[in-house]
Amino acid sequence: EAGVVQSPRYKIIEKKQPVAFWCNPISGHNTLYWYRQNLGQGPELLIRYENEEAVDDSQLPKDRFSAERLKGVDSTLKIQPAELGDSAVYLCASSLGLAEARGEQYFGPGTRLTVT
Amino acid sequence: QQPVQSPQAVILREGEDAVINCSSSKALYSVHWYRQKHGEAPVFLMILLKGGEQKGHDKISASFNEKKQQSSLYLTASQLSYSGTYFCGTSGSSNTGKLIFGQGTTLQVKP
């Protein structure tokens, strides 16, 4: 079974430039998460989708971040414009759709973003 | 409220045991444990739900004391492959609880 796929794996951009990350979850997983992981820290949830619906985006900085999950499968996370503090690893995860507290999440390899 | 993990780092020799703790200031419904190797995705280890259960997975087991709002991960007879950073994720609610991860515990197993 294929795991969670993310691209690109690495991205270096200058500040104020836009950037987009793509995620393809495990087949059949209704729930999709985007996390940000700063160096030496645990993952921090940005947004959670149940199928096409964003059910928790309270941690998403909406002035510059946006996300979409068209057709309830693939998802894209965008930052525009990027700031130096956005440098981090952006992780995508998916799960079967059990309540978040009870279901294991499967993570992709992440996209390491460096903003210069 | 982010859970607190201890210790922050531990170095072991192969065959030695280790315990990693995860504590919360809030009531917990579940605790999730993940291991992440450098540059790789976090990998799911196990979930413990409210009820004070203990789970095992080969030589890795965990306990959950809901009264003390803490969980412990036990690594027995450590292998080189156990090296990595261990994260606990906690949730305070069965249906709407967001998973909040601790800052991680780095484990290094030496030959």
Image: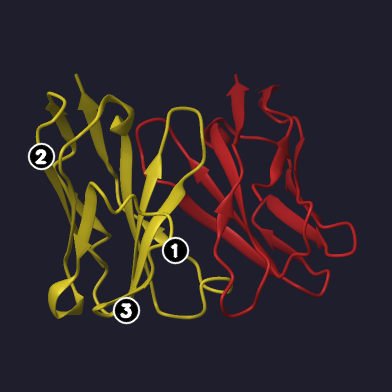
Going by the numbered disc 1, the residue's amino acid type is Gln
Kindly state the secondary structure of the residue where label 1 is placed: loop
Q: CA distance from mark 2 to mark 3?
A: 28 Å
Q: Chain of mark 2?
A: A
Kindly state the secondary structure of the residue where label 2 is placed: loop
Residue wearing tag 1: A105
Relative side of A2 to B25, left or right: left
Callout 3 crowding tier (Cα within 10 Å): few <14, some 14–19, many ≥20? some
Between residues B59 and A37, which one lies in front from this camera angle? A37
Percent position of residue A36, x then y: 37, 44
Are the residues under badges 3 and 1 in a single subunit? yes
Between residues B23 and B19, which one lies in front from this camera angle? B23
Q: Are marks 3 and 1 in contact (CB under 8 Å)?
A: no
Q: Is residue A17 above or below residue A66?
A: above
Q: In the picture, which quadrant includes the C terminus of chain B?
A: top right
Going by the numbered disc 2, the residue's amino acid type is Pro
- Residue at 32% x, 79% y: name it: A30
Residue wearing tag 3: A30
- Please give the label number shown on residue A18: 2
Q: Which chain is red?
A: B
Give the colour of chain A.
yellow
Q: Chain of mark 3?
A: A
